[in-house]
Image (spheres, rainbow, N blue to C red):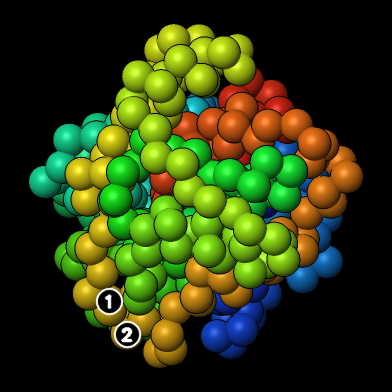
Amino acid sequence: MAILVTGASGHLGGHVVTALLERGVAASDIVAGVRTPDKAAPLVDLGVRIAQLNYAEPATIDAALQGVDRILLISGSEVGTRLAGHLNVIEAAKKAGVEKFVYTSAPKVTSADYALGAEHRATEEAIAAAGLPAVILRNNWYHENYTQDVLGAAASGVIAAAAGEGRVASASRRDYAEAAAVVLTEDGHAGQVYELAGDVAWTYDELAAAASEILGKDVAYVSQSAADKQAQLEQFGLPADVAQFVVGIDLAIADGVLADTDGTLARLIGRPTTPLVEGLRTAVAETQPAAWGLAGPALPRRTRVVTRSLAPVDEESSSASREPRDADR
């Protein structure tokens, strides 16, 4: 049984490859689809097969799917323009006759209207129209999305957002990756739509408390109005439309879009999800604070993460979208 993981050199994709190996899938049965093979050295070291795969180039998708039975489509990182690439993968998978198609979507895309949701809803509709034997993983937010908030708070003592008293049921990338590995390797699951979230839905006051514990200093949550948040982001140099997009994410959190958790993720992976403090502590430890410039405000960097990182956005970066979300998503 050959499994193709797209965006395999991104953060989520790399965790999925590792999770597949841990579940006993032979390295020779894993195809790591990457946009830039030269950046896939860690995957080469794992012994998996490397295939160049660019969502915008259908020929590369067709080639990567040769001999593949199951595929994980990790959503692309070009927010606003990624649907076309998703459609290319869907069409190629239909032609290849894959036996299972797994897609990393976003929470509540058919019941809530919020930034990032539309492209995922359209992708889900296209998967259904293609008649693929699909599993939809509606991943909630990643703990790791808040790494830069914690690092910025080391200097400012503040985490600011327009999220009000909204809650976020986040989990670690590894948690979501393990869930993807489960549905890819187990029989069944086809036709299911899983709303995946962490076990605990936390408030921003609790996020600040987690940052305090990690940093060993007081950190406070400052609740902003949408207008104040918009003005602050524009002051940091963001175009007005991008700032409005980021504010829209905060408002969606305030409206409860990311608050629901029913234990589905924990049941799939067979263990509790990673606690917020633990996930953030690991993420912070894996960064190089001196390189990020802790003395300066973190908001612009967080903005780049936010606009690409709502759970599903985790394909590897491109020079156009993210030269520096891997994703990160």
Outermost residue, left direction?
A: 111
Q: Is residue 302 above or below residue 194?
A: above
Q: Is residue 84 above or below residue 290?
A: above
Q: Which mark is residue 267?
A: 2
Rendered residue at 75%/31% (across/down): 296
Q: Which sits in the foreground, 329 or 233?
A: 233
Residue 65 lies, in percent from the top left, at 50, 51
The residue labelled by disc 1 is: 264
Q: Which sits in the foreground, 84 or 294?
A: 294
Specify the quadrant of the image occupied by residue 246.
top left
Q: Which mark is residue 246?
A: none
Q: Are marks 1 and 2 in contact (CB under 8 Å)?
A: yes
Rendered residue at 41%/21% (across/down): 228
Residue type for callout 2: Arg
Residue 235 seen in the current view: yes
Q: Which sits in the foreground, 232 or 40?
A: 232
Specify the quadrant of the image occupied by residue 130.
top left
Q: Is residue 147 left or right of residue 114?
A: right
Rendered residue at 71%/28% (across/down): 323
The kind of secondary structure element at disc 1 is helix
Rendered residue at 52%/57% (across/down): 208
Label 1 crowding class (10 Å Cα cut-off): few <14, some 14-19, many 20+? Answer: some
Residue 91 lies, in percent from the top left, at 33, 39
Q: Is residue 108 above or below residue 87?
A: below
Residue 3 lies, in percent from the top left, at 51, 66
Label 2 crowding class (10 Å Cα cut-off): few <14, some 14-19, many 20+? Answer: few
Residue 28 lies, in percent from the top left, at 67, 72
Residue type for callout 1: Thr
